Amino acid sequence: MRQWILKHRFLLMRRITQLGILALYIAGNSYGFHLLMGNLSSSLIMKHIPLADPFAALQMLAAGAIIGVDILIGAVIVVLFYMVVGGRAFCSWVCPMNMVTDTANWIRKVLFLEKVERKLWLGRSIRYWVLGLSLILSFVTGVAAFEMVSPISMLHRGIIFGMGMGFAAVLCIFLFDLFAVKNGWCGHICPLGGFYALLGRMSMIRVKHNQASCTLCMKCKDICPEKQVLSIIGKESGAIVSGECTNCGRCIEVCEDDALAFGVRNYISSASEK
Amino acid sequence: MSNLESKKIVISQRRKFLSLMAQSIGLSALGGMVWSGYLDEAKAAPLILRPPGARAESEFIRMCIKCGQCVSACPYDTLHLAKPGDQKPLGTPFFIPREIPCYMCTDIPCVPVCPTGALDKKSVSSLSEGVETLDIMKARMGLAVVDTESCIAFWGIQCDACYRACPVMDSAIKLEYRRNERTGKHAFLIPIVSSETCTGCGLCERACVTEKAAIHVLPLDLAKGSIGGHYIKGWDKADEKRLEGISTDVTTHTKRSEKSATDYLNSGEEMFK
């Protein structure tokens, strides 16, 4: 049991933060416990510190809205935070959709669906196109385009304020990830993930690889939802610098050689260690 | 040329890049058209009542970040965020007065919490001696409209439920007394709504005794007409001011009107030949 917990320490911690944040929102909105109010689009910590989804703010800006001071400050706080902890740390530590797609992925594994996969290919760069498209469409239609269709917002808004038919959208993502494309939503399409990936290019906390202790078992590549970021495994030591890495820590958990660990990125001596 | 003879076509990196870009842009255009088509449909919901202080619908929908802080601030659970399936712009706050109307709190808790200003504090504040104080009476969430066919007061039955429920009593809804010719000895107590003071809170709609409310709140855009520049109260100096900004060129020009009209009836030249 202890071994299992150790092997799933980041997974457990991620579930605790994901569910904890949702619980705090529910407590804040329905039970008068005002530590965290609002939802992931915009919220208020302890009634004073504003937070805002920077991607939503960007879309509103594109749509021609005047951005209020609260939203501006909130978005800057969130941007700075993820600059430190890793852009897509949002995806694996906060976003509730992660639990849905992780479940799909787990079932995929249990049922050996990968072995009989239908060939349906999606590029990993689709998210950046969707990201650009949502800004263009916000500008054209005068309304935050992705926020109007975002299944992520439907999910967290649904959990906090009432689901309605929102579960259908979430089910669509689940089925798509389960039967169509592995990591289809989070790893290919989601423009919010794309946005945080761009943000994460410069972020501080990264997974670091120690090539000397790597035995090339490739378990990390097997478990990683964004395999392309692990290109340096077994080749050179250094940090996983791609913004698409979600800092989920799954590779660290499966590594039996201590070749992977979270660390602070070294910006200065980029020649020897990126 | 048979397959054996055909050479493998090699394309340059540049050509490969250009083709890839063309394909991506094409697919984006396809997706964009579908997506924007949906957006145009989805943002158009004329039958929706917004919280107090909400800006005009097009502006509101642009600014609302869908955080739900107004919803959780409301002590009466009046406000809801539109869920998928509600047929309303997704995630934006609204209320249904027949279920829970706006009880017009004097401190308007839902407005100051709005982080984006989609709910405009200024529009529900009144200025007195340089100090801005929240004033819920300035809210214009909608306008109550009476269906005279189903309102039992128009039958001659004495019902003043809406009149009594109205928080702007005897101003937003007034009772007009009219002689009931049918009985010859009673009066109609007819509810008349004034758009000048009605806040659209919906307490009247909630109170209405008929099966489906005979008085209901409609969004202002839908409930109100607009006079335009063609009609003016000639007896009212203030009303004539409306004409000031209107362009003087109101003549319609057509192909025919470009030729000067011949006034054959009054010129009389034909007659005296």
Image (cartoon, coloured by chain):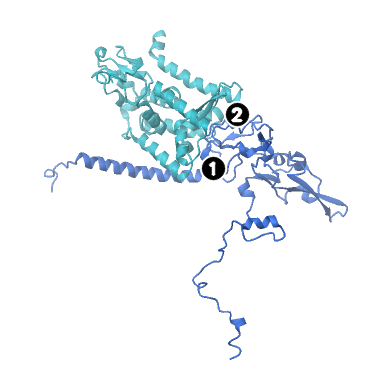
Chain colours: A cyan, B blue
Disc 2 chain ID:
B
Residue drawn 52% across the image and 32% down it = A69
Q: Nearer the viewer, residue B91 or A120?
A: B91
Residue drawn 83% across the image and 54% down it = B180
* Residue A204 coordinates in the image, percent (x, y): 37, 20
Q: Which mark is residue B59?
A: 1
What quarter of the picture does the C terminus of chain A occupy? top left
Q: Is residue B221 above or below residue A7?
A: below
Residue lying at the far right of the rendered structure: B185
Mark 2 vs 1, N-terminal side: 1
Q: Amino acid at mark 1?
A: Glu
Residue drawn 41% across the image and 11% down it = A5
Disc 1 chain ID:
B
* Residue A183 coordinates in the image, percent (x, y): 37, 29
Q: Is residue A86 visible?
A: yes
Judge from the rendering whether residue A78 lies leftward or rightward of residue B74; answer left or right. Answer: left
Residue lying at the far top of the rendered structure: A2
Residue lying at the far left of the rendered structure: B5
Circle 2 residues within 10 Å: few <14, some 14–19, many ≥20: many
Judge from the rendering whether residue B31 lies leftward or rightward of residue B147; answer left or right. Answer: left
Q: Amino acid at mark 2?
A: Ser
Judge from the rendering whether residue B39 lies leftward or rightward of residue B169; answer left or right. Answer: left
Circle 1 residues within 10 Å: few <14, some 14–19, many ≥20: some
Question: Which type of secondary structure does the marked residue at label 2 adopt?
Answer: helix
Question: Which type of secondary structure does the marked residue at label 1 adopt?
Answer: helix
Instruction: Provide the residue designation for mark 2.
Output: B72
* Residue A82 coordinates in the image, percent (x, y): 42, 24
* Residue B36 coordinates in the image, percent (x, y): 44, 44
